[in-house]
Image (cartoon, rainbow, N blue to C red):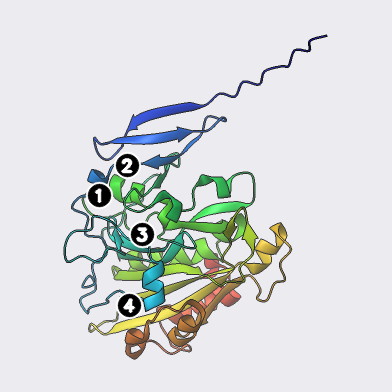
Amino acid sequence: MQLSHPKLSVPLNITIEIGESATAESAEVEYLDGSAFEIARPHSYYEGYTGYDPGFLGPELPLPELSGEQRRNAAKINDAPPGEDPTVLPYTHFSIVVNRRRQLAYYTVVNIDGSKSADFERRADKWYLDPRIAESEQIGESLYRRNALDRGHLVRRLDPVWGDDLSRANDDTFHFTNCAPQHEKFNQGKELWQGLENFILDNADLTDKKITVFSGPVMTDDDPLYKGARLPLAFWKVIGYCKPGGALAVSAYVLEQTQLIEDMLTVEAVFDAGTYRISLAQLRERTGLDFQYLEPHETPLTADGLEARVDRVLLHDDYSNLVL
């Protein structure tokens, strides 16, 4: 007797759409639930990008130099213009250096102009692969599906949204190079990652100051493995701005999500979830990134001013209780 086998039909839709901020074509992957996430624009979209401006604050705030090993592990632009560092990916008002082995940013850095920033409405999320580096050097959508992980912006969505092209600046923050796996409670909690980001930008608005923010994940060999990727258990920020009179002030912070990741995986939490002020030397020990050149401008951990207010708010209070 001959048996017939049922056939399983799986729909797959591939579409081509026109990018919002340019007339260039972009290839878009559409998933079975109708949502579209992974998009890749052509190289021409990024022509003319200059990215982060080290002289934005007045005093120079250069990029940290990578060690020999970090530079070997950094993703590189194959056709970078002569004289430009191929490890630095420029976007609108910000730049990113990617660790190709971890498929996450070593660091991001953004110029924020509080006097020109705009409250640009968030549209439906569309996340972009950066075609200037290999797709295998970027974590895509598969890591974030059907779990408690958010695609956490490293450069906050609204931070670079100022100047002449607000839409492009907004869209540029939706690159997979600019996100990292963050527990949803960590990413959205106003006492955690989102809270610090909001506080920084709100203070730039209120004081009419320019601010530079470096951000990135703390990556170790012991980070828990999930879906083929290692999940960072902490993130860091370095904030730079000028005091009245023009003196540069710098402070560093680390934000822990270990206890929240423990909700997903069997991981022993070493740190409580929360935000801590740390020194640049301690940040170097945890990340390997050398910000020693900024140490002469580092504010004491018990300083008055913006840094101390951030400390008190993040460690003891709710943002809604803050009075400037």
**Relative horizontal placement of residue 82, taking residue 104 as reference (left or right):** left
Q: Distance of mark 3 from mark 1, alpha carbons?
A: 19 Å
**Residue plotted at (41% across, 56% down):** 177
Which amino acid type corresponds to the residue marked 1 in the rendered image? Tyr
**For discs 3 and 4, the disc positioned in front in the rendered view:** 4
Asked if residue 72 shows in the view, the reply is yes
Foreground of the two, 130 or 274: 130
Residue at far front of view: 1
Residue at far left of view: 82
Quadrant assignment, res 199: bottom left
Mark closer to the chain start, 2 or 3: 2
**Residue plotted at (28% across, 42% down):** 42
Mark closer to the chain start, 1 or 2: 2
Q: Distance of mark 3 from mark 4, alpha carbons?
A: 24 Å
Mark closer to the chain start, 3 or 4: 4
Which amino acid type corresponds to the residue marked 2 in the rendered image? Arg
Foreground of the two, 108 or 193: 108
Q: Position of residue 102 (x, y in %)?
A: 49, 62
Which amino acid type corresponds to the residue marked 4 in the rendered image? Glu
The residue that disc 1 covers is 46
Element on which disc 3 rests: loop
The residue that disc 3 covers is 159
Q: Are marks 4 and 2 in contact (CB under 8 Å)?
A: no
Name the disc covering residue 41, or none.
2
Mark closer to the chain start, 4 or 2: 2
Foreground of the two, 322 or 294: 294
Mark closer to the chain start, 1 or 4: 1
The residue that disc 4 covers is 65
Q: Distance of mark 4 from mark 2, alpha carbons?
A: 29 Å
